Image: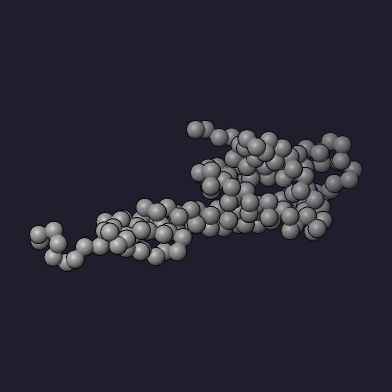
Amino acid sequence: MQLDARQAVGGGEEQAAPERLARRGLGVLSGDRSQLGSARETWRETGRRRARQGVPLELVINAYITGARKLWEALVERSRTDLVDVIDADMLIRAGKAVWTNLDVQNGVLIEAYHRESARLQRQVNGRYGPAAKMARLLGANWEPASFVAVPTPERVAAPHEGGH
């Protein structure tokens, strides 16, 4: 399955997500720190959701990098055309630094959330299908992954010498 940057970040149920994220990102870049808390939660949720959906982390990160690159290219283009009298070289350099610094923060938050969710999902799988669960089933125990307790069922518990061995 081939995903593009839009699908890796927003995908299906959230076709407007890239635009919403870009608007929020512009707010953060402009110094509006009131956007930062909700932006961080959006990055976390994107990481968790994409881990649950099995989207490879590198595709999600690439989507964020693509978005940052497009934002940077738009800033450069606007500085050369209709904002030539407003944006000087120093301002453009500061804006570029902010774009890439914020991308580092975004990716850090997203990667951490993705890894935590992946680990949580793996613990669930191991709880159901891991070595301890398999051993409990072989021994005739009820395996409760949520509590990590194996409880033998009375009808399956045999005396040590039953079975002829």
Q: Position of residue 134 (x, y in %)?
A: 31, 55
Image side of residue 149 versus residue 10, left or right: left
Q: Residue at x 58, y 51 (%)?
A: 48
Foreground residue, 48 or 147? Answer: 147
Image side of residue 111 versus residue 94, left or right: left
Foreground residue, 99 or 81? Answer: 99
Q: Position of residue 68 (x, y in %)?
A: 68, 45
Q: How many marks?
A: 0
Residue at the far right in the pictured view: 85
Quarter of image, res 31? bottom right
Q: Position of residue 157 (x, y in %)?
A: 25, 62
Quadrant of the rendering where the C terminus is positioned: bottom left
Q: Residue at x 65, y 57 (%)?
A: 105
Residue 13 visible in image: yes
Q: Position of residue 110 (x, y in %)?
A: 60, 53
Above or below: residue 31 compared with residue 84: below
Residue at the far front in the pictured view: 155
